[in-house]
Image (spheres, rainbow, N blue to C red):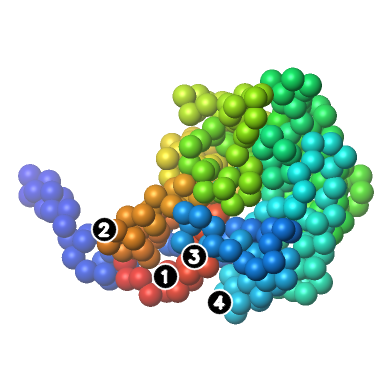
Amino acid sequence: METHASNMTRRRYRTSRHMRGLCAEVRLHTQGFIQPLFVDEALTSPRPAAGLPGVMIDTPDSIMETVSSDLVAGVEKFLIFPIPSKSMDGGFDFRFASSVISGLRTAFGDEIWLAADVCLCSYTSHGHCGILNEDGSRLMNAETVRVLADYASVLAHAGVDCIAPSDMTDGRVAAIRRRLDAEGYDHVSIMSYAAKFASQFYGPFRDACHSAPVGAGLRDRRTYQISPLHGGDAVDTALRDLSEGADILMVKPAALYTDIIASIRRETLAPIAAYHVSGEYAALEGLVREGLADRATAHLEVWTALQRSGAGIIISYAARPAKAWIQNHSP
Ligand code: PBG
């Protein structure tokens, strides 16, 4: 009876920062953070990304300074989104992306870990993630996969550490893995956007990358990205990608899909990356702007939830200040 009564006193766990820290099940560490980077071939000076406070879209020159100052701040892992100046729906030209990556590799060597998004949405005139059929009503799988494998090969040759395919066609992880291995890039890893949902929370990103679907054909990405109504599809897609050779499985959006993170974690011990996407970041920053939340504490709370669910890797637009926040924040 007595024991039962004392266990009712849950507040002993909460008495001080020492007790809260001691009993913490989640300890964030910057080793697991990845900072997204945008670089736009058409820009002559960096511009702020709409809706994303603290995020800049770099020029091919300014990206060097950004990475340089990030390294000083202790940020060393990046996911880069190269945005070409010209749109193209065939005869894809990956020279811009390639030059950015080889430039970064030459300048920073193995001081940085560099993943590159592999998708066609910032290339195509219609903004879809792959090649469409003649009347624009369908995304063609095999044709798209072939081009993505070419793109991955170019990026590997330029010196990228990790290929991150985000298009959501079937079979692209296997095709990319096969291609990389055949060309001697067996050391280059694949972080698959595996559990990628058709979401309204990619808005600020699409604005930054000029990649929102436009035109008379397919209106949205629901024929290739996963339905939020079908969580099991995300889990099975992640396991499928793992069997095709993915090294890291990504879930995105992140904070709305912690159930999916937890479900994948139950099925495999492979590393899971949670991408707190642009719209999720923007929503949180909106609260901060209104004076309704503390910025550092709010981001730390989100990251804690992601890690608690089973994600050891966090992709966040606030990875940059993460180190200072983690260090200075008392539990
Ligand atoms: C490209 C891609 C998208 C994001 C990452 N890669 C947008 C989309 O699928 O429309 C979203 C990232 C973000 O919102 O932060 N396919």
Separation of disc 2 and disc 1 at Cα?
18 Å
Dot label at residue 73: 4
Residue at mark 4 to residue at mark 2: CA–CA distance: 27 Å
Foreground label between 2 and 1: 2
Relative placement, left or right, of 114 versus 266 is right
Residue depicted at 67% across the width and 37% down the height: 127
Is the C-beta separation of discs 4 and 2 under 8 Å? no
The residue that mark 2 highlights is 292
Question: Which tag is nearer the camera, tag 1 or tag 3?
Answer: 3
| First along the sequence among labels 1 and 3 | 3
- Give the mark, 1 or 4, whose residue is nearer the N terminus: 4
Instruction: Name which residue type carries label 4.
Output: Ala
Which residue is labeled 1 in the image? 325
Q: Do the residues labelled 1 and 3 touch (CB within 8 Å)?
A: no
In the image: residue 270, left or right of residue 125: left
Disc 2/disc 3 C-alpha distance (Å): 18 Å
First of labels 2, 1 by sequence position: 2
Mark 4 and mark 2 lie on one chain; the one further toward the N terminus is 4
Q: How far apart are marks 1 and 4 (CA)?
A: 12 Å
Residue bearing the label numbered 3: 54
Residue type indicated by callout 1:
Trp
* Element marked by disc 1: helix
| Residue type for callout 2 | Leu
Q: Spatial distance from mark 1 to mark 3, Cα to Cα?
A: 15 Å
Residue at coordinates 65% horizontally, 25% vertically from top-left?
Answer: 216
In the depicted structure, whether residue 71 falls above or below residue 126: below
- Quadrant including the C terminus: bottom left
Asked whether 128 or 16 is in front, the reply is 128
**Secondary structure of residue under mark 4:** loop
Task: Single out the mark in the foreground, 3 or 4.
Answer: 3
Asked if ligand 1 lies within 8 A of label 3, the reply is no
Q: Residue at point 83% right, 50% down?
A: 94
